[in-house]
Amino acid sequence: MNFPLNEGAAAPVSVVIDGVEGFRQLLGRTLGPSRAMEITQERIETFCRAVDNFEWTHWDEARCQQSRFGTTIAPAAFIQAIFPYQWHSLAELRGFKSAVIAGSDRFRLLTPLRKGSVLHLLATVAAIEDRGKDAAVFLDLQWEIPGGGPAAVARYVLRLTTAGISAD
């Protein structure tokens, strides 16, 4: 797969999902790859400051060069935090009053997130549960490092509300 680095650019959305029916049409389909995100030292430090994480593996570049990582690494939670950035380059949602990330059923980091790595997101619509006028959409996610394979996998739950949407 070719993964162009288009960070900062307004990447075209790969699909417009119109209502719950739009998700049904995508059931089992994989969207992506998303727009790229490079893991820079600045991003690692900004994230770590925000969550008061001062572990040396994220800050001490000289010490990390001597470690098994060879460079600083981002915390595992970093990859979860960039989901919205990458998801919005894959899909535009229409026909919902609200769409929120309700959580994850699982998350697993498969490799350290080394400074300088570039990540892309692939998202598969795995399941849909109707909940009255609402729905829960389960997305199987895989973050990939081009040429390096999968970096993490997860199952996220999107909670979609359609109540109050007019047919206009």
Image (spheres, rainbow, N blue to C red):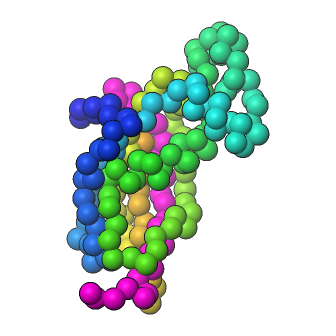
Residue 93 seen by the camera: yes
Quadrant in which the N terminus is drawn: top left
Q: Magenta stretch: dominant SS?
A: strand
Q: Residue most toward the front?
A: 168
Residue 148 forms part of the magenta stretch? yes
Which region shows up in magenta? 144-168
Residue at x 41%, y 70% (from the top left corner): 137
Quadrant in which the C terminus is drawn: bottom left
Instruction: Say which of 36 and 30 sits in front.
Output: 36
Examine the rendered structure and indicate whether residue 56 appears above or below residue 91: above
| Residue 83 screen position, x and y as percent | 48, 50
Residue 67 seen by the camera: no
| Residue 62 screen position, x and y as percent | 67, 10
Residue at x 43%, y 78% (from the top left corner): 97
Residue 159 forms part of the magenta stretch? yes
Residue at x 65%, y 30% (from the top left corner): 45
| Residue 13 screen position, x and y as percent | 27, 53
Examine the rendered structure and indicate whether residue 21 appears above or below residue 58: below
Q: Quadrant of residue 148?
A: top left
